Amino acid sequence: MEASLTGGRTAEAKAEAGPVGALAREVFTDIANKWALLIIEALEAGTLRFGQLRARVDGISHKMLSQTLRTLERDGIVERTPYATVPPRVEYSLTPAGRELQTVVHGFCHWTRYHLDHVAAARRRFDTPDHAADATLSNGA
Amino acid sequence: MEASLTGGRTAEAKAEAGPVGALAREVFTDIANKWALLIIEALEAGTLRFGQLRARVDGISHKMLSQTLRTLERDGIVERTPYATVPPRVEYSLTPAGRELQTVVHGFCHWTRYHLDHVAAARRRFDTPDHAADATLSNGA
DNA sequence: CTGGATCCATTCAGATACTG
DNA sequence: CAGTATCTGAATGGATCCAG
């Protein structure tokens, strides 16, 4: 039985609506946000230092990078390696699980790039005032 | 040349840092949030009505469902089909592009389920007070 | 049933300042 | 350089009420 994650009110869904489902939702929420995904994507380059990451993920703030990295480390997605040098140096890389996730994230980025034109066109259509012009509502039922 | 989406300050990245990069980031942000992903995942079931979607995506509010669906429709990911019946009936389904995205989302959900134990273990380790006990800081460089 | 609008609490996210 | 804490404004998200 494949747990659904969406957690609908079906029979099986109710059965796994316990702490497992809650944890799943929690983890899902941790990674389903743009900063987490962009960081994971950026770590495709291998091991990166804090500053390097900051340069690669355009627009991210010091705080968000730090915060998101901590979340990802906690979830076992990125590995943090501090060196006792001065000035301090900390390197971040993906764990094996993180690398698996990275392939998915990559698919995500690929989709976005590949369908940019499609999206742009869809938006033009949607934003056009006569959006419902040729709709001619299907008289269902 | 593969656009990076993360938009770092590399040479090529700067070259595409125009409206294209901006749009990419915008679209990415639209779909990189839990409600959008959960809705897309829920639409794996095929065509669903508003109420059915609401039942399938556990915990989503009326407002968020409505709002997110509009965003996804605008981006050409879901298709909205209203019927001129009374009471009104509206059906939602994935567009071809949406179905392609769905496979990626599915990988996402799969990763979450498959690595739940790994994450739980990582969290236990991370949340343990003696987190840095056996660290014995690598004396790099 | 679908969907929009409003009000309100919570959270997110950026800027800044400060420690090691 | 890396990281944390605080303060503030913006955005998210939920509850409720109203319209088609």
Image (cartoon, coloured by chain):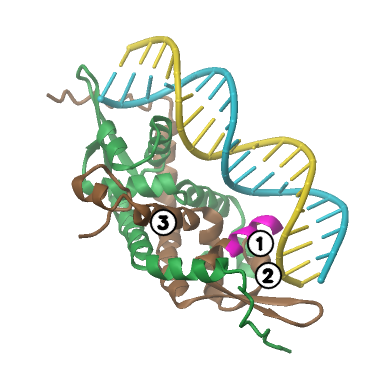
Chain colours: A green, B brown, C yellow, D cyan
Q: Is residue B76 visible?
A: no
Residue B96 picture location, percent across and down: 45, 77
Give the mark toward the camera: 3 or 1: 3
Residue A87 lies left or right of residue B131; in this view the side is: left
| Quarter of the figure with residue A120 | bottom left
Residue B65 in magenta?
Answer: yes
* Chain identifier of the residue bearing label 1 in the image: B
The residue tagged 3 is B23
Residue type indicated by callout 3: Leu
Among the two numbered marks 2 and 3 on one chain, the one whose residue lies closer to the N terminus: 3
Range covered by the magenta-colored residues: B62-70
The residue tagged 1 is B66
The residue tagged 2 is B50
Among the two numbered marks 1 and 2 on one chain, the one whose residue lies closer to the N terminus: 2
Residue type indicated by callout 2: Phe
Residue A27 picture location, percent across and down: 48, 48
Among the two numbered marks 3 and 1 on one chain, the one whose residue lies closer to the N terminus: 3
Mark 1–mark 2 Cα distance, whole angstroms, equals 8 Å
| Quarter of the figure with residue A70 | top left
Asked if marks 1 and 2 fall on the same chain, the answer is: yes
Asked if marks 2 and 3 fall on the same chain, the answer is: yes
Tag 1–tag 2 contact (CB < 8 Å): yes
| Quarter of the figure with residue B125 | top left
Residue furthest to the front: A129
Residue B50 lies left or right of residue A127; in this view the side is: right
Mark 3–mark 1 Cα distance, whole angstroms, equals 23 Å
Question: Which labelled disc corresponds to residue A112?
Answer: none
